[in-house]
Image (spheres, rainbow, N blue to C red):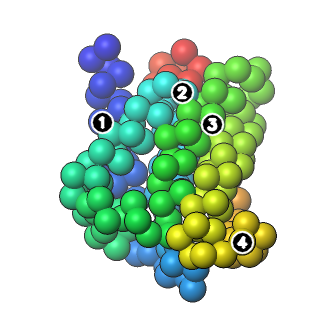
Amino acid sequence: MERSLTHIALFTALIAALGLVPKIDLAAGVPITAQSLGVMLCGTVLGARRGALAVLLFLVLVAIGLPLLSGGRGGLGVFATPPVGFLIGFPVAAFVAGLVVERTTLAPLWAAMCGAVIGGIGVLYAFGIPGMAIMLDKSLTEASYLAMAYLPGDLIKVVLAGFVTQAIGAARPAALMSRA
């Protein structure tokens, strides 16, 4: 239990640290950040349950006002902006990414990449696109086109998540909790 709490806190801090990478603002109002890589890693390394808990802890800290989102944003107000769907989707994305890694027999690299694609892109976009559509007063089709600007960067994050997960599994197999 204590080890799980430590890992959850550590990965919450990882998501926050990835917020220090400068954001790139797009016209859609949803910035390009490195924090979705942290969400992917929460699932692929910690597993479904622990990964989702790490992301939920991060969102609670943001909601109470800590400026942990990229660009120093925080507080309840961020949940009334175009990225709201992505933020709400973060814990679900981590859960699904972790579930894929836990349930597959693929090597850690491929399992993590599959989990990151399904959870970190598929699930995240399933929440993010409707959130953008609502907040920007666009149709789902228009919001989908806007979201395609994020896809190349997210595919790079998928590859990074795969290699980081594989490296953790090779160096410290017990630390790869998604495979424990």
Q: Which residue is mark 3?
A: 97
At x 31%, y 65%, the residue is: 77
The percent position of residue 10, horizontal first and vertical second, equals 32, 38
Q: Dot 2 surroundings within 10 Å: few (below 14), some, or many (20 or more)?
A: many
At x 28%, y 53%, the residue is: 63
Going from N to C along the chain, the mark reached first, 1 or 4, is 1
Mark 4 and mark 2: Cα distance apart in space: 34 Å
Q: Amino acid at mark 2?
A: Gly
Secondary-structure class at tag 2: loop
Q: Which residue is mark 4?
A: 139
Horizontal side of 159 relative to 17 (left or right) equals right
Task: State whether residue 148 appears in this view.
Answer: no
- Report which quarter residue 78 is drawn in: bottom left
Q: Dot 4 surroundings within 10 Å: few (below 14), some, or many (20 or more)?
A: some
Residue 146, numbered circle? none
Going from N to C along the chain, the mark reached first, 4 or 2, is 2
Q: Amino acid at mark 4?
A: Ser
Q: Dot 1 surroundings within 10 Å: few (below 14), some, or many (20 or more)?
A: some
Q: Looking at this view, is 140 or 53 the one in front?
A: 140
The percent position of residue 67, horizontal first and vertical second, equals 25, 63
CB within 8 Å, label 4 to label 3: no
In this view, 103 is above or below 89 = above
Mark 1 and mark 4: Cα distance apart in space: 38 Å
- Report which quarter residue 128 is drawn in: bottom right
In this view, 138 is above or below 34 = below
Secondary-structure class at tag 1: helix
Q: Which residue is mark 2?
A: 47
